Amino acid sequence: MAISAPIQAAQRSAAALRQAFVVSKGRERNVVLALVAYALAWAVYGTIAKGSQGLHPDMTELIAWSRELAWGYAKHGPVAAVLVWAWFAVLPVAEWSYYLLAMLMPAVALWLMWRLSADYLDIEKRVAGVALMTFVPFFNFHALKYNVNTVLLPMWALTTWWFLRSYDRLSLVYATLAGLAAAAAMMTKYWSVFLLAGLVVAALCDTRRARYFRSPAPWVTVIAGLALLAPHLYWLTQHDYAPFSYAMTVHGEASFLANAKSAFGYLGGSLGYVAAPIVVALLMSRPDGTTLAEMVWPKEASRRLVAMAFWAPFLLPVVAALAGLVDITSLWSMSAFTLLPVLLLAPGTVKVSAVRTERILVAAVVFPIAMLIASPFIAIADQRKGPPPASALVAQLASRVERDWHALTPQPLRYVGGPADLAYGLAAYAADRPMSLIGLPAPGAATLKKDGVVFVCFAEDKGCRQNADTQAARIGASHLTTFTLTRTYLGIKGRPQRYAVRLVPPQR
């Protein structure tokens, strides 16, 4: 009797949880509230678990970019930086607030999956499908590192949803929205070319293609997209297509063997990341060959369009890699799984009962709670291992550099240079909100002479120190300071790191 009472209470709670999303008239509101709680829980997890690490350089880089808004940057388009600018115009620059912004990206993507799936799944399957996606690391662990890949989660979901709506309904409103979302996705990361090409392939392969291409819808999509993309395209021409040069330098010109290896690694790694929803869906359906075929390539026209809209953007990078055009990694597929729940659950032979929905929902609630409990122990383990100084110590470094700077001049610190990770970190953490000299248009010598500049190096990096000395000599009198920083977290000392800082105050 004593044992059965908690079990019965748990069963009632699970039933109430399912009812909130399946039966309740307020389920749309409940889904939004659940996703807000999801984002908050994982943001708290990130703040605690990563408390000894500092912000990842990808994150501080975007803060630095956001200080100088432009239609493009050396690596990517402007969307991710604009979102950072808007977010920190309201909230303080802090690790907790940044992790919250990061987690809003998958939360919004999950909400878009919820809305999109209404056209293809019954309510039981919709709830189960979205809940299953919360076990995919792309939507929590990896999403905590805000970068262009994280922002692509909602961008690809939005573009896909509005494209499918415009195709099925020939709606000019959805056609316009699809074009705008596609342009925003491209201005987030050029990897989105695979999404756009994949959706074109899906449209051309669909049996209703004549109906679609004879309507104004596809041309409205193209016009709307180009209209929004035009300022960025102009920026590219004015900056010698810098992001393309960066992409080819970092990810291009590999051997065929290396590209083939990356292609198969992309496939295997991507499927590994989404193994949880795939395995659960297969266990629920225990599919025969017919059901598996329906999952992969449905017979119904509207669902076949969905399948092609999933497979083409996912597989086209493999074709590009094997053709020797690009080196790819499985992490870049994180935005490609918007339609996975529809593919897995739409076949009529896949049954999602009330009991199964309850179990999936309970697991989806328990998972982030368990990670929250584990987060302090994860932080301690990382501190003992020794997080990278470039991120773990950069807040202390910014404080020390500003203190030394203001001992020389009352003027605010305007510019910082040095290795990218350090320069971006100082730009992010320094109270004066300086501009990084890395990855942004450099000011002229006269501006640097008038406002001053700081060059920061790891003390053991002789090349960096020599370059800093050379640049400082061109501006004017400077001061060199060296010091060692160590971060203590929860009573555990981290690795010490020595820095060399060349301060060039405003020249009179």
Image (cartoon, helix red, strand yellow):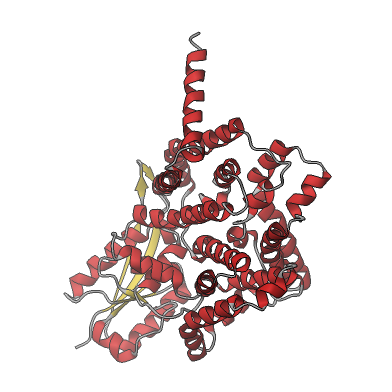
Instruction: Give coordinates of residue 408: x percent, y percent.
Output: 19, 74
Residue for point 40% across, 65% down: 60
The residue lying at 43 percent from left, 61 percent from top is 390
Q: Is residue 382 left or right of residue 274?
A: left
Q: Is residue 15 above or below residue 191?
A: above
In the rendered image of this protein, does residue 210 appear above or below residue 31?
Answer: below
On the picture, is 483 further left or further right than 57?
Answer: left
Q: Is residue 111 above or below residue 164?
A: above
Q: Nearer the viewer, residue 203 or 147?
A: 203
Q: Position of residue 446 (x, y in %)?
A: 29, 91
Residue 80 placement: quadrant: bottom left
User: Where is residue 466, by image quadrant?
Assistant: bottom left
Q: Which of 243/230 is in front? A: 230
Residue 307: x and y in percent read: 70, 59
Residue 50 visible to an observer of this rendering: yes
Q: State left or right for residue 478 relative to residue 248.
A: left
x then y, percent, for residue 304:
72, 59
Q: Residue at x 77, y 55 (%)?
A: 299
Specify whether residue 458 is in view: no
Query: What residue is at 72 percent from the left and 69 percent from the top?
Result: 208
Q: Specify the farthest residue to the right.
A: 289
| Residue in the foreground of this view, choosing between 463 and 141 | 141
Q: In the current view of this chain or complex, which residue is farthest to the left?
A: 410
Q: Quadrant of the C terminus?
A: bottom left
Considering depth in this image, is 494 or 161 the residue closer to the camera? 161
Instruction: Count numbered badges in the picture.
Output: 0
